[in-house]
Amino acid sequence: MIFLNCLNEALVQTDDKTRIDVSRSFVSGLPITGITVKPLVSGSAISVFNVKQERWYLDWAYGVAGDYLITVQATDGVETANKTFPIKIISASEDNLYSDDSTMFSIESELMRYIPAGKNSFKYAHREAQSRILNYLDRKRIWNIDGTPLTKNQINVDDAIVKWSLYETIYLIYTDLFISIGDKFAEKVAQYRDLRNNERDRASIRIDVNKNGTLEINENQDLKSFRMIRR
């Protein structure tokens, strides 16, 4: 029996490189003799097979936003199995990240050398930083007037939020490098944790808390003296 497995990002921005890794697929019996990946419903399947199983993956980029199905097919010479795996592609405007690689590399150019295999950017880290910012605001009970959590599009992307996101992203990347490579990144982890904390603590951001689509003068939130909303 053939067991198909696909490791792929759930969410990717258009034109961003992503890796479709099927190397954890296996057979309970005969060895796999062929395995292909089809990143689009249309078009041809692409073979990723080699005997040593060193490169059972496909690097790809999607040019159009949408919901896609990745089709993986494998055979052991007797049996053939197919399985699909979902992936969601969104545009840059829909992603609406608060920081970007170009600004980050102007501060820490060495990070260009550490873009992970199968990627050509750190967009995934900027996206995680954005998620952590929203989670922080939720923990601080900075909510909409109706008590619902804020969404990424309700926050005005000004200098305060850009710096917060930037330092959060760099902190995340150096933390990962510290864990995977070693102690030489410990100082950078501490440095950007402090910069993140300082920017976060002193930030004053504008939030569309009444969700009317307009940022108004009275929708300015000082994070040092945040308002409390009870659900």
Image (cartoon, grey):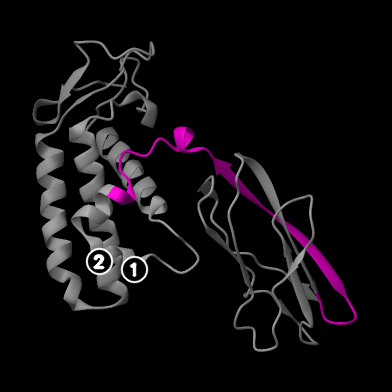
**Residues drawn in magenta:** 75-102
Q: Is residue 69 above or below residue 164?
A: below
**Which residue is at the front of the view, 228 or 26?**
26
Residue 114, numbered circle: 1
The image quadrant where one finds the C terminus is top left
Identity of the residue drawn at 17% across and 63% down:
189
Q: Is residue 102 above or below residue 1?
A: above
Q: Is residue 113 above or below residue 125?
A: below
Q: Mark 1 touching mark 2, by CB under 8 A?
A: yes
Identity of the residue drawn at 83% across and 81% down:
76
Residue 213, numbered circle: none
Q: Secondary structure at mark 1?
A: helix
- Indicate the position of residue 93 as horizontal and vertical percent values: 45, 33
Residue that carries the numbered disc 2 in the rendered image:
110
* 64 with respect to 212 (left or right): right
Residue 193 showing in the rendered view? yes
